[in-house]
Amino acid sequence: MSGRPEPLWPLFGGLETLDGIGPKTAKTLADSGIETPRDVLMTLPYSGIDRRRRAGLHEVTPPETATLEVEIGRHHPAPSRGRPYRVTVSDGRTEFQLVFFHAKGDWMRRQLPTGQRRVVSGKVELFDGVAQMVHPDHILAPEEAADLPAFEPVYPLHGGITQRVMMRAAQSAVRLAPELAEWIDPGLQGARGWPAWHAAVEAVHAPTGGANLSPADPARERLAYDELFAHQLTLALARSSLKMGPGRSTVGTGALQQKVLAALPYDPTGAQSRAIGEITADMASPKRMNRLLQGDVGAGKTLVAFMALLVAVEAGGQGVMMAPTEILARQHLEGLEPLAADAGVRLELLTGRDKGETRARKLAALASGEIQVLVGTHAVFQKDVVFHDLRLAIVDEQHRFGVSQRMELGAKGAKTDVLVMTATPIPRSLSLAQYGDMDVSVLDEKPPGRKPVTTALVSAGRMDEVVDRLRKAMTEGRQAYWVCPLVDESESSDLTAAEARFKTLRAALGEGAVGLVHGQMPPADKDAAMARFVAGETGVLVATTVIEVGVNVPNASIMVIEGADSFGLAQLHQLRGRVGRGEAQSTCLLMYAPPLTEGGRRRLEILRETEDGFRIAEEDLAMRGAGDLIGTAQSGLPRFRIADLERQAALMETAQSDARKLLNDDPPLESPRGRAARHLLWLMGQDRAIRLISVG
């Protein structure tokens, strides 16, 4: 199937094929992302206006929109510039006025000839006790009034395009829409009471009341489902094309894992054991693993990851763990070293800094298989890095990768199993949208021994008390982070905030006691400042949010976040997760400058109430919406025109299981329903997915 199916051609023609759209309007629409009749079909009305005919003004409670048949009375031209032109009209019982600004007299007389009848529709308001309708939306002769819908859909508008133009274009697009075979599972469609695709398209553009505008309306819900189903079908195709690629079975002996478990001071949590079991089973299967390990701050991802690496080593192969930055790669190394020592496994670090002799030595040991587990930055992807037998690749903090990068990653080690780790709890609906091509393991329990962090809200006016508290903690040998907000987007100001705070704290706490890291420092200086803090040489580290991900200093037990109300919830949760890693009772102080906005107060209160990252992520989604939550531009998140990820999370789950089942039953999409699903993929512009349909 090489090109778009013929029945869909009209929907992908030019916008000028629609009634009332010329080149200029077409360009305005295209600038706002509406480029074809199909895009017009998928731009749904967001509200509606009741245009049902009323018997007279006595049925209207101003201010409200009303449609009335009236007899035109006297014209009262504007007495002076800037004053309105008025026309008296009567509904048979009551007189009122139509009001126009900047009106031309002769045009007014043609539109509203005295003594004739007209149907007028618009907002009726009281002005000095007299009812008036300013600039009616519609003025129609009684015989034309039948064309006015009883409930007029209201579309989102762009650049001076009117409601009337959008409505005509939408109705014209509906007429171009073909009847298409059904791609939804018949049982599901029957249970939900969803109409056929064409009927749904007709219905959403001709609502008869407010209920038809709700996401729960069957026609709207069906079209939302189509979008989600097409997206999940694309992800499922990506997933099966990855899995179709030959994998290999990696089965461990358990000997090295036993050594590590025996040396642990506590038992793994139920969630850790479950995740290890899921990963081990995936690695043993002949298909390639493509799994996401999602864990909250401090849920013990390191142990799970290392157990997976040991399966690769026990089977005679190698494993690699990659992090986005050198600081994080070093931290992984530190986290894994004690475990590797317990297991008796050779572990090495490879970053862009390894040069010359050192690098050559490491590469030789990798190629010979002496290095069993490698930790590194993306430098491990370079051409000259050759593994003896790479069985498992673990990628950390991968929300910086989209589906296409995951496909490339799979291509690197021909049969390598892939495990992705993220410390950012993502609400279920988003994780399905973003990672629907992967199987997911969730760590939702904290290992024993992690003490809860006390979270308190502090007004910025109490800065001196906070500094006194830091002084006292430092005399007890404890350490603290002090995070400064990004004042605005410009880099210089974020710098000034951090540098100014650094100076005041140094003056209060002593020269050598305070360190500083921010995004504009040369990497070597940043690493040095971090290293001094990790070694305990500085007691307080002033930072911008560069410390958000992964820093591990067990002795740091105080986190001060200045301007906390300007941070997002997920970010605050990540920052708080930097403390509470050691023996001491830890505290997180959220400083804010009153008065707080409603949203700011809500965010800080949620943090005070809970440490559950998944609950925080759900609240964040509810407050901010999907696009903002993970920065739509780099998130790899699709932009849906109809489906609403926040409110239709359950639909996304249904779409995922249905898409996987369809591909399982009919991999080449050749059954009648499979062929209909191909039409859906074309309709949703998922051409890339169509190329993935297994050939032969």
Image (tube, rainbow, N blue to C red):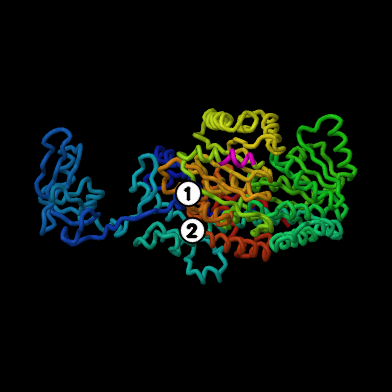
Label 1 CA crowd tier, 10 Å (few <14, some 14–19, many 20+): many
Q: Residue at x 15, y 40 (%)?
A: 85
Where residue 113 appears, as percent x and y from the top left, is: 13, 47
Q: How many marks?
A: 2
Image quarter of residue 101:
top left
Residue 334: in magenta span: no
Residue 39 is marked as 1
Element at badge 1?
Answer: helix
Q: Residues within 10 Å of mark 2 (few under 14, many from 20)?
A: few
- Asked if residue 459 shows in the view, the reply is yes
Instruction: Give the residue pinned by disc 2.
Output: 647
Q: Closer to the camera, 423 or 171?
A: 423
The kind of secondary structure element at disc 2 is: loop
Placement of 665 over or under 371, stated as above or below: below
Amino acid type at circle 1 is Asp
Residues shaded magenta: 469-475
Horizontally, residue 168 falls left or right of residue 78, namely: right
In primary-sequence order, the first of circles 1 and 2 is 1
**Residue 211 x, y percent position in the rendering:** 38, 63
Q: Depth-wise, is mark 1 or mark 2 nearer the camera? A: 2
